[in-house]
Amino acid sequence: MLVIGKLELESPVVMAPIAGFSDVAFRHILRRFTNSLMFAEMVSATALVVGAKGSLRRLEAKSNHSPLGVQLLGANPAHFYEAARYVEDQGYDLVDINLGCPKVPGEQLAGAKLMGYPELVARLIRAMRKAVDIPVTVKMRAGLEEGRINCVQIARIAQEEGADGITVHGRTCAQRFSGRCNLDWIAQVVEAVDIPVIANGDIQTPQQAKMVLAKTKASGVMIGRAALGKPWLLAQVERYLLDGEFFPDPSFEEIRQILLDHLDYIQRFLGDIYLRKNMRKVVSTYFKSVPHVRRLRQRVHQISDYFRLREELLSFSLEPV
């Protein structure tokens, strides 16, 4: 069990918020396999406050996905206060501040860049804590770059300002997603604070998740892009952490049906325009690690009609080994 403030979670495995992927259709599929904490797509606190339609729409389709959190991006404490209140009023279970994205739109001060502004981070967390009763968490990087590692400092600030939990990605902002994820930095944060710390970065298998927990002593793990197209991965990790058992990936036929259901959910919940824009991206995530589907991937990238895409998927048979 993982306890974050008042929120008691069955699983120590958390699904990361991923812009462009963590929509209602993805969450609907994910819920088939796990009751883990997951997140809606990241939204700008300022966009919520000014009533930007796209941001409001992302949070409208909450559906029955609890426990479910929202991650806010930005740097304006007043906007974070109002946006956090909105998130709570919409029935979400947790609100998180993004100090982890190494690249944000434009040149705005947000995401991992905030690691260089500890006093502003304190004001943002303070504003969120005053605004809501639901748990407030922080997702951060280790620091801006080598030589400017300040995750322990930011973690202590988060705890002092009333945050209920912290997620640490063991890379710097400058690294983005290259190089090695440094588990020592995560372990230092675990040692420095009394609130739960969730480890993030390069967790792609159940075995890696167990190793990360053993080395960092974190309370949980957050899985990100490794679960795109593999929504059963979190369940595999949960089972392995529980009793050391590993269950295999679904068969190609089972994966195809999960994918078709995912596409149907996109059409049902988000509409035809969203579906046409995103269907090829979604298909490629499911087949990125499936062998012998090269022909299918090539064909999919040439199709723009959903019904033709379904026909192609249904008629495809695996290439011989």
Image: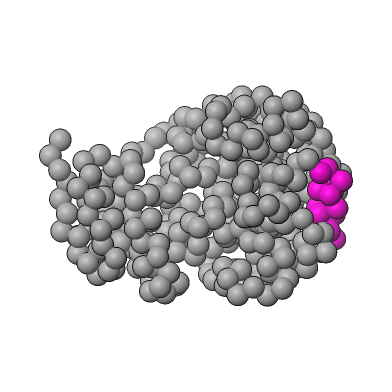
Judging from the image, the colouring scheme is one colour
**Magenta residues, dominant SS class:** helix
Identify the image quadrant of residue 56.
bottom right
The extreme front residue here reads 107
- In magenta, the rendered stretch is 117-130
- Residue 192 percent location from the top left of the image: 79, 31
Q: What residue is rendered at 71% in x and 63% in y?
A: 45
Task: Name the image quarter holding the C terminus.
Answer: top left
Q: What residue is rendered at 47% in x and 39% in y?
A: 237
Q: Is residue 50 left or right of residue 33?
A: right
* Above/below status of 270 relative to 177: below
Task: Name the image quarter holding the N terminus.
Answer: top right
Q: Is residue 159 left or right of residue 45?
A: right
* Above/below status of 283 relative to 309: above
Quick check: is 318 in the magenta stretch? Answer: no
Quick check: is 129 in the magenta stretch? Answer: yes
Q: What residue is rendered at 54% in x and 32% in y?
A: 178
Q: What residue is rendered at 57% in x and 42% in y?
A: 222
Q: Nearer the viewer, residue 274 or 317?
A: 274
- Residue 281 percent location from the top left of the image: 38, 55
- Residue 271 percent location from the top left of the image: 42, 74
- Residue 154 percent location from the top left of the image: 79, 39
Q: Is residue 311 left or right of residue 7?
A: left
Q: Nearer the viewer, residue 174 or 168?
A: 174
Residue 38 visible? The answer is: no
* Above/below status of 186 relative to 5: above
Identify the image quadrant of residue 269.
bottom left
